[in-house]
């Protein structure tokens, strides 16, 4: 497994999922109810750089380090960052104005927030029996997987091989209804947008949340589902073919 | 027009799901076969005759996939099947092969211009694998040049690093270049001097999901020249095109000579046999290989293959297919134009590929293919098609009528697209 790819997944798919968690889960939203924004940047040497903004019950993750941050979390390498996300190492905090409050947030509420995220992303069978938890969990998983696809296509050596064969356009991965993500491909670089495309070049749609959940958990086989019409495909299938080859590598990283 | 439904196909498919991975796997199944939407497709067939196939619901199709190319004379051709049946009464898979293997090899070497010998196996992938092993043994080198968009079977060496089950070492010696690109070939030769065993390509680029591309003037001659200069074995994968462009081989059709040429599909009108043929120079190398199989020397397919080749020669199969396919493509084109569609038809007519260009994302094309299907015309949206000798003018007429109705439906359902009239 490639540590750089995993670092990008941890940053954009996992930490980035806090955006959706705060939208979907009132308990998580309440943890970031502060009016004044807390702006915290991640600076991973040789890896992802991104800025988290927490305010008014929401979280936003921007790519790059925003100049007006309260706290910068410096990490020496991608492998070290992956240890940090796994709770096995600590970053070096570099406070600026308002840095004390931000540091306090990182030590307390942020930890609770990520704990809440983990509850949904690693939901047990018992958790999933609750339809509210199951729904939030599945929606989060769709976003996490969608974002992870782009990171693997952009950084993983085998993923990049697949991306080399994807033409420009928007691939829609969705669940029947209104849930969906866009994998936007431009010059073989992939970017995930957490909503459906207006004009998809290709579509892969799961017939229900339950089916999506079963697929994410590896309980059903995608090929059988296509044969039974439970996964609908259309448009430029060659794009889907290659996105699916990248999708096939997602569990390798998410299980890390 | 009456449209089809498939309740019995679905019943069989549900049974299949319980005992067969993904129900029906591979290119003949709904997932890899791109059955979009799956409810418009027959999943299980019952019988076939000539150019027609019937499914288990009794729906009749004019089949333009021809079993993905194996049907060239017509399904259940009487002459071929009688030869096979006669051989069945004598013996098929014996402890030593019957003389049919020798007769068949003699016939193939008399028929195919670049063939001094013939080595038989079962599938096209066996033949291409045999060719690569031969090239590697002959040259004592490992790397192989592929042309982007290729398909040479499912052996591990033919797959790509991102395919399920493939490890980097399986494809470590694979080099990829674009089709019709001599500078790219020269570059890869320079970068891998002394390491390349083979160049493998199809007569023209008939890859899936995209317009098929014919060789530019002088392309193959230059490839031949470079392979000879660098001591690289030139392998022609004629599995798909073989005997549809030229009975003497598709290298002969495009004016060059391959070192090794691979056949399958049309070789015995659907009876299971494939062949690696080549020049004398490579006979010692292929003779040395540890490469065989339980059924590779079965006599029934050889008997069928002899009958098939003799009949193909007798009826001038290439002319028959080209004339019929050209008529068919013209009929599709006319139906498209009549309804304001831009139907881009590419490749050689005998193996035509097409797509509706009004919608660059292929949704309209997939809808049209699906509408054709439920009206009894079996096409695919991603792969080149095939015709057989049994295709009649009446079949083409019926196809054109179905195409016209299907175009009208797609146009009605897609008012957002631009049409030419």
Image (cartoon, coloured by chain):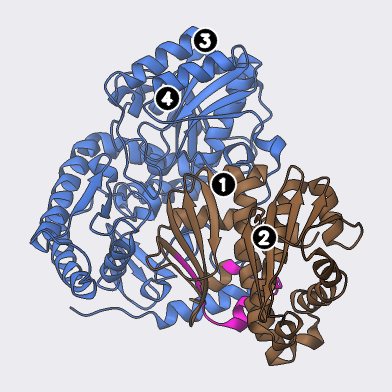
Chain colours: A brown, B blue
Q: Are marks 4 and 3 on the same chain?
A: yes
Query: Which residue is more in the foreground, B331 or A167?
Result: A167
Q: Residue at image x 33%, y 64%?
A: B363
Q: Are marks 4 and 3 in contact (CB under 8 Å)?
A: no
Distance Cα–Cα, label 2 vs label 4: 64 Å
Q: Position of residue B226 (x, y in %)?
A: 44, 12
Q: Position of residue B337 (x, y in %)?
A: 11, 57
> In the rendered view, would you say A96 is above or below B97?
below
Q: Position of residue B79 (x, y in %)?
A: 31, 47
Q: Are marks 2 and 4 on the same chain?
A: no
Distance Cα–Cα, label 4 vs label 3: 31 Å
> In the rendered view, would you say B61 is above or below B285?
below
Crowd band around label 2 with a 10 angstrom C-alpha radius: few (<14), some (14–19), many (20+): many
Crowd band around label 3 with a 10 angstrom C-alpha radius: few (<14), some (14–19), many (20+): some
Report in which chain the residue with disc 2 lies. Answer: A
Residue lying farthest to the top in this orientation: B229
Q: Looking at the image, is mark 1 or mark 2 nearer the viewer?
A: 2
Q: Residue tagged by mark 3? A: B230
Q: Which mark is residue A162?
A: 1
Crowd band around label 4 with a 10 angstrom C-alpha radius: few (<14), some (14–19), many (20+): some
* Residue B260 painted magenta: no
Q: Which mark is residue A12?
A: 2
């Amino acid at each position: 497994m490639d540590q750089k790819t995993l670092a990008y997944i941890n940053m954009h798919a996992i930490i980035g999922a806090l955006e959706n968690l705060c939208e979907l889960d009132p308990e998580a939203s309440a943890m970031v109810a502060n009016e004044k924004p807390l702006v915290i940047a991640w600076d991973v040497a040789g890896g992802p750089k991104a800025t988290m903004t927490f305010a008014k019950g929401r979280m936003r993750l921007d790519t790059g380090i925003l100049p007006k941050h309260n706290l910068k979390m410096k990490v020496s390498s991608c492998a070290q960052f992956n240890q940090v996300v796994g709770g096995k190492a600590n970053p070096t905090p570099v406070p600026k104005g308002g840095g004390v409050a931000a540091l306090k947030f990182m030590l307390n509420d942020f930890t609770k927030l990520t704990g809440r995220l983990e509850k949904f992303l690693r939901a047990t069978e018992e958790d999933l029996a609750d339809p509210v938890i199951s729904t939030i969990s599945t929606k989060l998983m769709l976003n996490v997987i969608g974002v992870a696809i782009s990171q693997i296509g952009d950084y993983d050596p085998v993923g990049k091989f697949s991306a080399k064969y994807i033409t420009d356009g928007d691939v829609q991965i969705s669940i029947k209804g209104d849930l969906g993500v866009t994998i936007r491909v431009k010059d073989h670089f992939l970017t995930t947008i957490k909503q459906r495309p207006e004009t998809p070049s290709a579509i892969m749609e799961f017939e229900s949340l339950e089916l999506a959940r079963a697929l994410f958990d590896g309980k059903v086989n995608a090929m059988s589902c296509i044969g039974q019409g439970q996964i609908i495909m259309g448009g430029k299938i060659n794009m889907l073919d290659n996105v699916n080859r990248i999708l096939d590598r997602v569990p390798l990283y998410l299980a890390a | 027009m009456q449209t089809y439904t498939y309740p019995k196909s679905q019943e069989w498919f549900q049974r299949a799901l319980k005992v067969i991975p993904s129900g029906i796997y591979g290119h003949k199944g709904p997932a890899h076969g791109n059955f979009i939407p799956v409810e418009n497709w027959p999943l299980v067939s019952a019988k076939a005759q000539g150019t027609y196939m019937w499914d288990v619901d009794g729906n009749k199709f004019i089949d333009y996939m021809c079993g993905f190319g194996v049907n060239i004379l017509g399904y259940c051709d009487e002459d071929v099947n009688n030869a096979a049946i006669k051989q069945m009464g004598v013996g098929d898979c014996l402890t030593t092969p019957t003389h049919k293997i020798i007769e068949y090899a003699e016939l193939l070497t008399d028929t195919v211009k670049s063939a001094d010998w013939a080595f038989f196996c079962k599938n096209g992938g066996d033949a291409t694998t045999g060719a690569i092993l031969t090239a590697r043994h002959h040259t004592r080198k490992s790397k192989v040049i592929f042309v982007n968009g290729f398909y040479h079977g499912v052996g591990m060496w033919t797959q790509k690093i991102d395919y399920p089950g493939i490890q980097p070492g399986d494809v470590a010696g694979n080099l990829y270049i674009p089709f019709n690109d001599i500078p790219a070939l020269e570059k890869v030769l320079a970068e891998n001097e002394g390491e390349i065993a083979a160049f493998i390509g199809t007569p023209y680029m008939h890859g899936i999901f995209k317009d098929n591309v014919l060789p530019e003037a002088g392309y193959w001659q230059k490839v031949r020249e470079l392979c000879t200069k660098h001591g690289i074995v030139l392998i022609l994968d004629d599995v798909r095109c073989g005997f549809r462009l030229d009975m003497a081989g598709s290298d002969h059709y495009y004016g060059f000579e391959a070192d090794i040429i691979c056949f399958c599909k049309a070789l015995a009108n659907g009876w299971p046999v494939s062949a690696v043929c080549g020049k004398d120079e490579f006979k010692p190398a292929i003779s040395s290989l540890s490469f065989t199989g339980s059924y590779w020397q079965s006599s029934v397919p050889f008997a069928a293959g002899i009958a098939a080749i003799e009949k193909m020669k007798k009826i001038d199969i290439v002319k028959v297919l080209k004339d019929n396919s050209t008529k068919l493509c013209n009929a599709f084109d006319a139906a498209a134009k009549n309804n304001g569609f831009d139907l881009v038809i590419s490749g050689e007519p005998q193996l035509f590929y097409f797509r509706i260009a009004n919608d660059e994302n292929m949704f309209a094309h997939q809808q049209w293919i699906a509408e054709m299907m439920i009206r009894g015309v079996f096409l695919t949206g991603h792969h080149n098609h095939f015709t057989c000798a049994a295709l009649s003018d009446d079949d083409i007429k019926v196809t054109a009528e179905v195409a016209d109705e299907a175009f009208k439906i797609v146009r009605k359902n897609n008012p957002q697209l631009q049409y030419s009239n």
